[in-house]
Image (cartoon, rainbow, N blue to C red):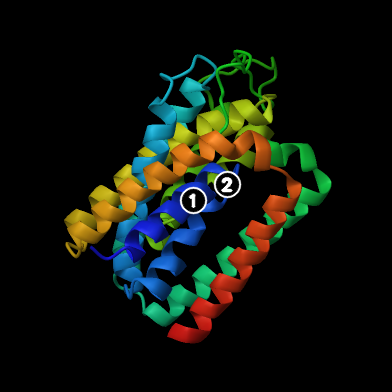
């Protein structure tokens, strides 16, 4: 058995678990650099691995009551609408264009991770592998509502829908989970804690990535099932390992290491394949 896909999946799961947002962007360049996958193939495998590991993380202790169910499902539904469009576009655009756009996106995410680690170091301790069972139940509030309460009206729905549409498009194009958009969006639209936003983002990412994986199978129909299963299974194991060590290692310095590693990997991928 080729051990390299297992190592890649394990690393993907660990990074996903030990970051609050942006970890899934490592998947595509690693699959291209070390598993010899084209970008289209890597995006499909990445979506499957991200969907499997974040779904596990969402379900591991039961769906905790602190999830922002209504905003989360609205955002996920909007994302599921545009994920197939992103997958369709990704199969038709020149790979060199996609690689350049991906490198720019990865660099922006790396920059944001670095900035957050400096400006909000306490936020780096809230990661996807954290235990969310002790988080307080969030009130259903909306910063854009006149009353402060969440309402099924334009003021509260517009940000969620637009954010979901953009997240889904990027997920389909680049195989990313979209936590780098989802978490800040939830924090901006509702007065919730970082732990509540990250917890809710897990379910949203799982649903959007699942939609992306399904659209990849329908539209592209190119998937190495053995490789995909190995990477997804190892990613779940990586998430489990992350759960065990997150309290001891999750900190601002680790986020800086991930940010620097992401920037380096994206540049190497761009230089090698373009």
Q: Residue at x 38, y 78 (%)?
A: 95
User: Dot 1 corresponds to which residue?
Assistant: 166
| Residue 263 place in picture, x, y as percent | 62, 68
Q: Quadrant of residue 77?
A: top left
Q: Can you give x and y, in whole percent of width and height, for residue 151 in the image?
A: 55, 18
Residue 85 position (above or below residue 148): below
Mark 2, residue position:
181
- Give x and y (percent) for residue 230: 27, 54
The answer to whether residue 261 is seen in the rendering is yes
| Frontmost residue, 219 versus 154 | 219
The quadrant of the image that shows the N terminus is bottom left
Q: Residue at x 27, y 66 (%)?
A: 2
- Mark count: 2
Choose between 249 and 198: the one closer to the eye: 249
202, 1: nearer the viewer:
1
Residue at the spot 59% in from the left edge and 45% down from the top edge: 19
- The mark that comes first in sequence, 2 or 1, is 1
User: Do the CB atoms of the residues marked 2 and 1 lie less than 8 Å apart?
Assistant: yes
Tell me the distance, in whole angstroms, between the alpha carbons under discs 2 and 1.
Answer: 9 Å
- Residue 238: percent from left, percent from top: 44, 45
Q: Residue at x 48, y 29 (%)?
A: 72
Task: Tell me the element at label 2.
Answer: helix
């Amino acid at each position: 058995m080729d051990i390299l896909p297992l190592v890649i999946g394990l690393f993907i799961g660990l990074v996903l678990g030990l970051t609050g947002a942006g970890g899934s962007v490592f998947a595509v360049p690693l699959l291209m650099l070390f598993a010899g996958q084209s970008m289209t193939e890597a995006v499909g495998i990445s979506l499957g691995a991200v969907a499997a590991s974040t779904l596990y993380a969402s379900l591991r202790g039961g769906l905790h009551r602190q999830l922002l169910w209504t905003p989360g499902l609205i955002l996920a539904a909007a994302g599921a609408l545009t994920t197939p469009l992103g997958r369709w576009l990704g199969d038709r655009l020149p790979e060199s264009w996609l690689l350049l756009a991906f490198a720019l996106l990865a660099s922006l995410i790396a920059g944001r991770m670095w900035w957050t680690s400096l400006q909000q170091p306490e936020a780096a301790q809230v990661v996807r592998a954290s235990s969310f069972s002790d988080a307080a139940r969030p009130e259903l509030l909306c910063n854009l509502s006149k009353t402060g309460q969440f309402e099924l009206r334009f003021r509260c729905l517009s940000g969620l829908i637009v954010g979901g549409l953009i997240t889904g498009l990027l997920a389909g194009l680049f195989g990313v989970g979209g936590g780098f958009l989802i978490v800040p969006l939830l924090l901006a639209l509702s007065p919730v804690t970082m732990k509540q936003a990250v917890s809710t983002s897990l379910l949203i990412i799982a649903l959007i990535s699942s939609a992306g994986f399904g659209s990849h199978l329908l539209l592209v129909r190119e998937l190495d099932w053995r490789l995909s299963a190995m990477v997804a299974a190892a990613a779940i194991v990586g998430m489990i390992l992350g759960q065990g060590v997150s309290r001891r290692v999750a900190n601002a310095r680790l986020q800086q290491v991930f940010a620097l590693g992401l920037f380096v990997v994206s540049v190497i991928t761009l230089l090698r394949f373009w």
